[in-house]
Image (cartoon, rainbow, N blue to C red):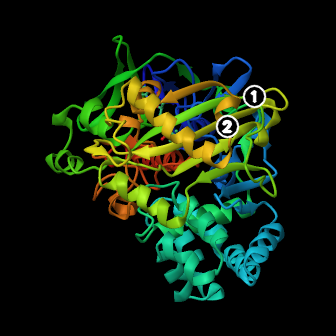
Amino acid sequence: MSGSHGHDAVVIGAGPNGLVAANHLADAGWSVLVLEAQDEVGGAVKSDRDVHPDFVHDTFSAFYPLAEASPTIRSFDLERHGLTWVHAPAVLGHPLRDGSWGMLHRDREVTAGLFDAAHAGDGEAWLDLCGQWDRIGDQMIKALLSPFPPVRNGIGALARLRSVGGLDFVKTMLTPATDVGLSRFGGVGPRLVIAGNAGHADIPLNAPGSGLMGILMSMLGQTVGFPVPEGGAGQLAHALRRRFESLGGEIRYAAEVVRVEVTDRRATAVLTRDGERFAAGRAVVADIVAPHLYGRLLAPEDLPARTRQAMRSFDLDPSTVKVDWAVDRPVPWASAPPHAPGTFHVADSVEQMTEAHGQVAARTVPAAPFMLAGQMTTSDPTRSPAGTESLWAYTHVPQHSVGDAGDGSVRGVWDRDDCERFADRMQARIEALAPGFGSTVVSRRVLGPRELEQRDANLIGGAINGGTSQLHQELIFRPVPGLGRSETPVRGLYLGSASAHPGGGVHGAPGMNAARAAIAHARVRRATGGLLR
Ligand SMILES: Cc1cc2nc3c(=O)[nH]c(=O)nc-3n(C[C@H](O)[C@H](O)[C@H](O)COP(=O)(O)OP(=O)(O)OC[C@H]3O[C@@H](n4cnc5c(N)ncnc54)[C@H](O)[C@@H]3O)c2cc1C
């Protein structure tokens, strides 16, 4: 058990990764303390009634296919701790101005039927893709979520490669999202669905890696759906909290950690802003974005020069503006979708999606932002009174803007005025697809980069994924080359946030990988009388 005082492990941050790590360590019989800077658990998995008292809005994230597909989160049996997953009638829709919809229904036959009606042959092509995923998808997800290199699961995926077409399948996965649909489908619907889903990461849609993301998210939508926790995103975090507390775990709120204490190159304790010190007998797990862990919480002298140097080239992902609306009617779509979707994407075409991404990459505020959006009452009727909609949309903007690719009304400094002008631009995108939308809005909240970071310090400048998901910062390069696992240069300190492989999204893998590494090292330490690790 723990040393003379304190806990076996201190987990810094109660985001989903911190809570997953805490649960796994508690499962192993460790005494665990979680220190959370905010006054509630969840990190970017929270809900509130701040937009309107009758409406529950998810403050940040909303749809959880990755949680539902994650072996770790599934193994926690959170339903026994109060979590209920619910689904919208359709997973995802992409409305176009000509009145058509690209649509992903949970039932693959329905999706295929819709694609085929728009372009003969696309239905069969879609079912083919689903069939390939059935054969290899599970292994691919396990490989993606395990520490890199994913030896066992990687071999498992390789073993199934032949059954899905071998190198042709690999090529499809490496094809950029803009093109992956072109090679397989004649109609625009499947291309929109795949490219839109790729847009959930910040990989340019015309770069390798984006196609894999687009197919992964589309096939997750097709197999597990895009579930939401009944009652609000926060219910997922609270189920993790309840499970942890039922194992004897302890959480302290308003406890911002400002320093990880290192003695003889080993993390031994943490200090909070108000001067409290908490000893960690075996491990400290940091659910902390990498620049803060390496640049603030650790003293420079506790880090090798090469780590400090490498962190200088750590790339954040772009910034984000999120708008929440309380709407007194269902969204008045000009052309109603064939099935009501939970998630919807807003872009006039795949090309326009690429253009908007390009404008962000060129550090300009996008003229016609590509938007991810959610109809939450359609997904979960408990979110707002019957006949109303709890709605949100977010989009990416540059971390540092050099100009406005639109009408010049947004300066890119993200003060209140910028946020409201840009929210008007986003709202106009919905209005163009749903005339009269503006008159249904009862209340609106705009969370710009600053507001996001104020509510969760890991969202530096509104970056939502703990660092870019582009290839140069993935796998062994995440967060920096040479530190591709949860181990850090400080013994007993583990990086367990979205800044660690495999990155952002609510799947708990960085937290789980960190907890597993901590447990394995503690065993080695005990077995070697403290000589190793
Ligand atoms: C607007 C938005 C929309 C998103 N949509 C989705 C989605 O629909 N589906 C999905 O799967 N993912 C989504 N994501 C991404 C997902 O939410 C994140 O990848 C995920 O929450 C990362 O989990 P984490 O535990 O690493 O960090 P976080 O969730 O950021 O949690 C970190 C925690 O650490 C705390 N903390 C930070 N510094 C300190 C400190 N010094 N001391 C103590 N505590 C500290 C923070 O307060 C926070 O509670 C979205 C994110 C955002 C912001």
Q: Residue furthest right?
A: 386
**Residue 372's x, y, as percent?**
57, 48
**Residue shown at 72% from the left, 42% from the top:** 228
Q: Secondary structure at mark 1?
A: loop
Residue 437, label in figure: 2
| Residue for badge 1 | 328
**Quarter-wise, where is residue 183 in the image?**
bottom right
Q: Is residue 212 left or right of residue 202?
A: right
Q: Amino acid at mark 2?
A: Phe
Q: Nearer the viewer, residue 159 or 90?
A: 90
Q: Secondary structure at mark 2?
A: helix
Q: Nearer the viewer, residue 79 or 391?
A: 391
**Residue 313's x, y, as percent?**
22, 51
Above-or-below relation of 364 to 18: below
**Residue shown at 42% from the left, 21% from the top:** 4
Residue 496, label in figure: none
**Residue 489's x, y, as percent?**
27, 46
**Quarter-wise, where is residue 63 in the image?**
top right
Q: Is residue 341 visible?
A: yes
Above-or-below relation of 307 to 292: below
**Residue shown at 44% from the left, 26% from the top:** 451
**Residue 163's x, y, as percent?**
66, 87
